[in-house]
Image: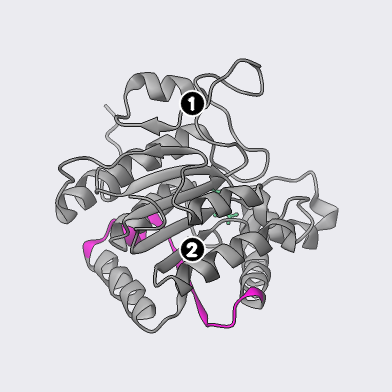
């Protein structure tokens, strides 16, 4: 499945695209992404946006605490940055958007999970763009997903999407870290997510935001097992979105399982999973 023949797409945007200078939201990269969303919708596709960036967008409002990275402060940054981020997205669109803030606690409760699904479906039926983020201002360690890569996969499964597009700061998955090795090769297609694939991801993380290549592969595993084609692409390049609209793969695509898990089985395996711990 590619963008041209998809029906419902979840697009995940990382913090570095929203607030590249950690100094409030910037249109620099978002304009191209917003145009891509508009074009997908005009082609009849339904789009759900998972947007990171509340902490990065809110950081500039706390200048005296620039070196303080306490959890309490990050929650305050998230609360303040979230409205700035929503306002920024809203400026690009002449159709309405809606904010949904979630925690892992909401997703792993089946009743709340179904309620989230209903809300997403109702918004889509009415042509409203759902914009989803983790509710960072209220989460605790036990309640949070922690990174929006995994959150976007849970959302893609909940929304019955057929494509998950993770916009990153690299072109896709490489066989070794491209920042350290000049001869690193981009892997265009991953049919199976094995230990070897996880090893290729190493522990590279983003400078802004929480995720890295490892969380993207975890997300790809969650999404592909639900039958969702999952892409990692470079969100900083305009050509990425032109290629996607032409039905091409500008990054790495993780192919969906031939026999995807049933929805409830998927929810139990990948969403309800990490509930508590046993200490012996
Ligand atoms: N929810 C976080 C935020 O909006 C981002 C998490 C992530 O970077 O994956 O700042």
Which residue carries the number 1 mark? 201
Crowding around mark 2 (Cα neighbors within 10 Å: few <14, some 14 to 19, many 20+) is: many
Which residue carries the number 2 mark? 49
On-image quarter of the C terminus: top left
The quadrant where residue 45 appears: bottom left
x%, y% of residue 234?
Answer: 59, 43
**Residue at coordinates 40% horizontally, 52% vertically from top-left?**
164
Magenta stretch containing residue 9, yes or no? no
Seen in the picture, residue 93 relative to 242 is either above or below; the reply is: below
**Residue at coordinates 30% horizontally, 38% vertically from top-left?**
277
Seen in the picture, residue 24 relative to 175 is either above or below; the reply is: below
Crowding around mark 1 (Cα neighbors within 10 Å: few <14, some 14 to 19, many 20+) is: many
Q: Earlier in the sequence, mark 1 or mark 2?
A: 2
> In the picture provided, is 22 more to the left or to the right than 39?
right
Mark 2 and ligand 1: say if the CB distance to the nearest ligand atom is below 8 Å.
no
x%, y% of residue 221?
Answer: 32, 38
The quadrant where residue 56 appears: bottom right
Front one among 60 and 179: 179
Tell me the colour scheme of the image.
Answer: one colour
**Residue at coordinates 28% horizontally, 64% vertically from top-left?**
113
Query: Exactly how many numbered labels are in the figure?
Result: 2
Q: Which residues are magenta?
A: 92-110
x%, y% of residue 22?
Answer: 76, 52
**Residue at coordinates 58% horizontally, 48% vertically from top-left?**
240
> In the picture provided, is 2 more to the left or to the right than 278?
right
> In the picture provided, is 215 more to the left or to the right than 124?
right
């Amino acid at each position: 499945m590619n963008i041209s023949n998809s029906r419902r797409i979840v697009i995940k945007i990382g913090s570095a695209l929203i607030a590249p200078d950690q100094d409030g939201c910037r249109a620099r990269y978002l304009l191209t992404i917003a145009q891509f969303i508009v074009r997908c919708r005009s082609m009849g596709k339904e789009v759900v946006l998972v947007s990171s960036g509340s902490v990065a967008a809110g950081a500039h409002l706390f200048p005296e605490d620039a070196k303080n990275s306490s959890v309490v402060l990050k929650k305050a940054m998230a609360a303040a940055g979230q409205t700035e981020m929503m306002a920024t997205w809203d400026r690009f669109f002449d159709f309405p958007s809606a904010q949904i803030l979630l925690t892992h606690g909401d997703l792993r409760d089946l009743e709340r999970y179904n309620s989230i699904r209903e809300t997403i479906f109702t918004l889509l039926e009415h042509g409203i763009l759902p914009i989803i983020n983790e509710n960072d201002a209220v989460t605790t360690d036990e309640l949070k997903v922690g990174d929006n890569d995994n959150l976007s996969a849970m959302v893609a499964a909940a929304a019955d999407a057929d494509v998950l597009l993770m916009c990153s700061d690299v072109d896709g998955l490489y066989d070794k870290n491209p920042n350290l090795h000049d001869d690193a090769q981009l892997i265009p297609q991953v049919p199976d997510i094995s230990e070897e694939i996880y090893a290729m991801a190493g522990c590279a993380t983003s400078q802004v935001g929480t995720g890295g290549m490892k969380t993207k592969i975890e997300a790809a595993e969650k999404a592909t097992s639900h039958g969702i084609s999952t892409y990692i692409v470079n969100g900083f390049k305009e050509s990425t979105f032109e290629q996607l609209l032409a039905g091409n793969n500008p990054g790495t695509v993780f192919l969906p399982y031939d026999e995807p898990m049933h929805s409830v089985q998927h929810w139990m395996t990948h969403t309800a999973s990490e509930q508590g711990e046993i200490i012996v």
